[in-house]
Amino acid sequence: MGADRTFAKAKTKRGRPAQDHRQLLNGILWVLRTGTPWRDMPERYGKWTTIYSRFQRWRKSGVWNKMFAELQTALDVESNVDWEIHFIDSTTVQSHQHPERLVADKGYTSVTFRRYLHRKHIRCTIARRSNERCRGSFNKQHYRKRNIVERLINRLKQFRRIATRYEKRAVNFSAIITIASIFLFSDFAYRL
């Protein structure tokens, strides 16, 4: 996946020797799993200030997003990514810009949202509420696949830091979700 290039740093003769990346990543994953504050991290992972500052540095430089993009590319090459159908749920997500179809639950059934999708030429499969007047075609096969997003959110919530939303800043929360997704999807890719 090119992780060596992603984490590579120019060698300089200044400063302290760099800490092992695996130890840092394990520390970051420990915080994600347990949800504890950074400063309560066990010393076996190194100084919490070093690990937190590296998390921040990698977030700011886009390392997490680059890793996730490389993983997506690797899965896409093996035809394990379907870009035509996108599923959304109430958790804020960034999605591919031009899906052919969007699948969502009743929380997204509004005339305004449906018109927006229509203007963008995106077909939708959204369950309608029982009190809605308009009834249109509804693809039950696509809607049944919606459990994919539900299962993913449940797996993400196994990371306590995500389930309890300890991160105060949206950019950090987004990075935490990206790291957890890398962890989950790389586990999926490894089992293929």
Image: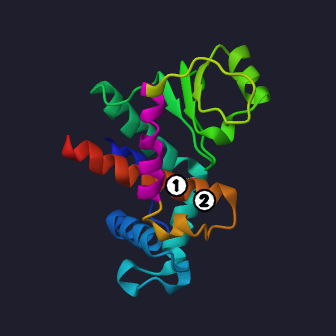
Residue 153 placement (x, y as % from top left)? 48, 53
Kindly identify the amino acid type of the residue bearing the numbered disc 1: Ile
User: For residue 135, which quarter of the picture?
Assistant: top right
Q: Main secondary structure of the magenta part?
A: helix
Kindly identify the amino acid type of the residue bearing the numbered disc 2: Phe
**Residue at position x 65%, y 32% from top?**
128
Tag 1 residue: 177
Question: In front here: 22 or 87?
Answer: 87
Secondary structure under tag 1 reads: helix
**Residue at position x 53%, y 59% from top?**
176
Residue 185 placement (x, y as % from top left)? 35, 46
The image quadrant where one finds the C terminus is top left
Query: Image check: 153 left or right of 94?
Result: left
Question: In front here: 106 or 118?
Answer: 106
* Vertical comparison of 169 with 80: above or below: below
Instruction: Name the mark on residue 173.
Output: 2
Which segment is the magenta one?
A: 141-156
Instruction: Name the mark on residue 53.
Output: none
Q: Is residue 9 visible?
A: no
